[in-house]
Image (cartoon, rainbow, N blue to C red):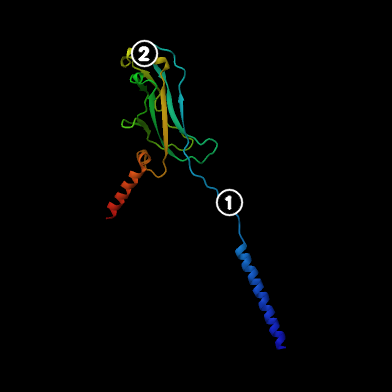
Amino acid sequence: MKEKIFKNVIFFLFVTGLLCTLGTAAYFSDFDKKVNTAAVGSVITEIDEDFPDPTPTPVEDNPSYKKKIWTGNFSGNEKGFNADCYVRMSLSYSDNDIGKGVELLGLDTVNWLYNAKDGYYYYRNKVAEGEVTTPLCTGFRINSKKIDDTYRDSISDFEINVYEEAVQAEGFSDYKSAWSYFNNPISVQKTERREIVEKSS
């Protein structure tokens, strides 16, 4: 009788141990598959302009031309991936001598601020995905008094070239701090560290 009880106890312990082992194995092997997708924000900007074919006008008449220039923060087919950004533009001329006589018309001096040190026009507002800036200008004219007679025949081949850059706006309080970091990130970081040390001491 004792032997039978002993065997039953051993069998019970064996079954209990087996069930616990299977339960534990099931606990540790149970999983659910979840695919996480992440993407890095990008900045894709494009220059756009409204520049109809100009009507030939003698340089003596101080010709003026319509030319609206702006830029936009576009993401193509991928919506929701473009980060807010700050932009800046610079203008150059195919002929520097003629460029001396160029005067921009309708220049937006409220939203675009010119920096004479680097020659860029800075857009002071953030440009979100799908948004465009205000036009930098609405046109230009050529002041004949500033053009040497030697270059008057080159007016018909004269070009205004537009160059544009953008920098991500995230983490910066305004366009100045964003571009300052973009132009020299190492020195900016050192300055920030020095300020933190000075404040903590």
* Amino acid type shown at disc 1: Val
* Position in image of residue 175 (x %, y %): 37, 38
Q: What element carries label 2?
A: helix
Amino acid tagged 2: Arg
For residue 98, say whether it is visible. Answer: yes
Q: What x and y, as percent, mark residue 170?
A: 42, 43
Residue drawn at the location 41% of the way across and 25% of the way down: 161
Identity of the residue furthest to the bottom in this view: 1
Secondary structure found at label 1: loop
Q: Which of 86/107 is in front?
A: 86
Q: Is residue 104 above or below residue 38?
A: above
- Asked whether residue 110 is in view, the answer is no
Residue 35 — which label?
1
- Circle 1/circle 2 CB separation < 8 Å: no
- 31 to 62, vertically: above or below: below
Question: Which numbered circle lies on residue 192?
Answer: none
Along the polypeptide, which appears first: circle 1 or circle 2? 1
Residue that carries the numbered disc 2 in the rendered image: 152
- Asked which quadrant contains residue 107, the reply is top left
The residue depicted at 45 percent of the width and 25 percent of the height is 49
